[in-house]
Image: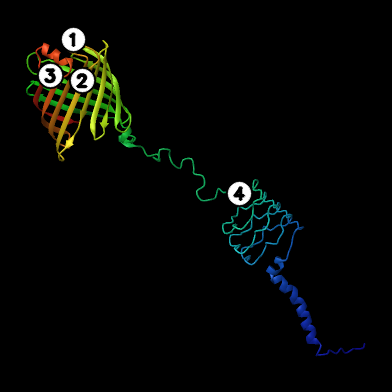
Amino acid sequence: MKIRKVSFNTAVLPMSILSVSMLLATPLANAADGHTTVNKMTMPGMDHSGMDMSGMDMSDMDHSGMDMSGMDMSDMDHSGMDMSGMDMSDMDHSGMDMSGDMAGMDHSKMNMSGGMAGMDHSGMDMEGMDHSSMDMDMSGMQGGKAPADARSSDYSNGVPYGRYGKPVMMGSMPLWSVSVDDLGYQFDDDQINFEVEGWYGDDSNRFRLRTEGSAQTKDDKEIGSLSSLAYWKPLGIYWNVEAGVAYNTENDKPALMAGIVGTAPYFIETDARAYVYTDGQVQLDLGAEYEWRLSQHWVVIPEVGLTAFSKDDSDNHIAKGFNEMEAEVRLTYETLSRQLAPYVGISYESALGDARDLRRQDNESADGSSLTAGVKFWF
C-alpha cells in the first residue's frame, strides 16, 4: 500500500479558520440581539392558536426597548392561547409603545387571572375592543364580599342592651313635666290665684292638662277655674298649636278649645285660645309675657291679658266684646337651678266696654289693684 503525504500550506490555514468563525458568528449575533429582530418582524399571517406557552417564564425578559407601534396584529387569533401559567408580575412594559390599532383582536377567551398590576395601559387604544365575553375573576381583590354575619343590622354585634334597654334619641323619648306658673295671694282682693300646667310626650306630640283661676278666701270661698285637656303639636320653630276640650266652673259649661302658643319677636311669650261653649258662646283669651332678666337670679316679669266674648250673657255678667283686662308686674328670684322662684308684685284689673256697667249694677268695682306675693316652680 502506498502512503501519500499531504502537505498543508501554513499560510492558508489561519485564513480558513477565520472565515468559518465569521460565518458561524453572524447568526449567533442576530439571535442574541432580540430587539433588532423583533423590531422588523411582521406577523400578519401567523396562526398562534396551537402554540402552548404555558411553560414559558417571561419574568426576566426586558421589553423596555421594544417598539411594537408598527406591528399589525389585527389578523392574529389569540383565542386558543393559554396564558394562565405565565407570570408577568415582574415584566417591565414601561417602554412598550402599544398605541397601535387593536380593534380586531379577540380577547374573549384569554385568561388573565394571573394579574397585570405592574402594566401601564395609559397609551393603549382599546376603543374598538369587545370585552363583553372576558372572564375576569375579581373575587380576590381587597375587600371582596362580606360574609352574611359580618355585622348585625343594628351594629350591636350580638351584644344585648342590658337592663337599661335600647337607647333612643332624646327628641323621640317620651317625657313629662309639671309647671306652676303662678301660685300667689292677692292681699286687697283676699283671694289666691293659680295657673298650673302639665304635659306628657315628646318634641313632636304632647298631651297637655292646664288649669287657671282663683279661689276666694272669705265669705262663700268660691272657686272659679277654666281647665282644658289638649293635644299639642309644633307648627314651626317658634309656634305650637293645641286643640282639645275644656270646662269652665263659672258658667258650669263644657267647651271645645283651640289655640296657638309660642314666642313672638323680641322673646315675648304669647298665647291665644278660643273656647266654643255648648250654648254657642265663644270666649277668646289673649295673653303676653316677657322676662326681663336683671341678673342670673333676679327677673322682672310683666304680663298682660285680655278676655272677649261673642255675645251677651246677663246671667254670668258677660257683655259682647272685650270684657276684662288684667296686668301684673312681678319681681322674682330664681333659685335651686331656677326650678323655684318666689316673687312679689302688683296686679291691676279693669272691666272694659259694657262689662263696666254690668259690674256697677251688681255693686262691684270696675277697677282694682292689689299687692301680690307667691311662688312659681316646675319639676
Chain-order first, disc 1 or disc 4: 4
Q: Tell me what residue is drawn at x 23 percent, y 21 percent.
A: 285
Q: Quadrant of the N terminus?
A: bottom right
Q: In the rendered view, tell whether residue 314 sits above or below residue 236.
A: above
Chain-order first, disc 3 or disc 2: 3
Q: Single out the mark in the foreground, 1 or 3.
A: 1
- Residue extending farthest right: 1
Q: CA distance from mark 3 to mark 2?
A: 19 Å
Q: In the rendered view, tell whether residue 22 sits above or below residue 75.
A: below
Residue kind at label 4, given as amino acid type: Met
Q: Are marks 3 and 2 in contact (CB under 8 Å)?
A: no
Q: Quadrant of residue 329?
A: top left
Direction from residue 305 to residue 162 in the image, left or right: right
Q: CA distance from mark 1 to mark 3?
A: 23 Å
Residue kind at label 3, given as amino acid type: Ala
Q: Which residue is mark 1?
A: 314
114, 357: nearer the viewer: 357
Label 3 secondary element: strand
Q: CA distance from mark 4 to mark 2?
A: 82 Å
Q: CA distance from mark 1 to mark 2?
A: 16 Å
How many other residues sit within 10 Å of disc 1, few (<14), some (14-19) or many (≥20)? few
Label 1 secondary element: helix
Q: Which residue is mark 4?
A: 136
Q: Single out the mark in the foreground, 3 or 2.
A: 2
Q: Which residue is mark 3?
A: 215
Q: Are marks 4 and 3 in contact (CB under 8 Å)?
A: no
Q: Tell me what residue is drawn at x 74 percent, y 76 percent.
A: 25
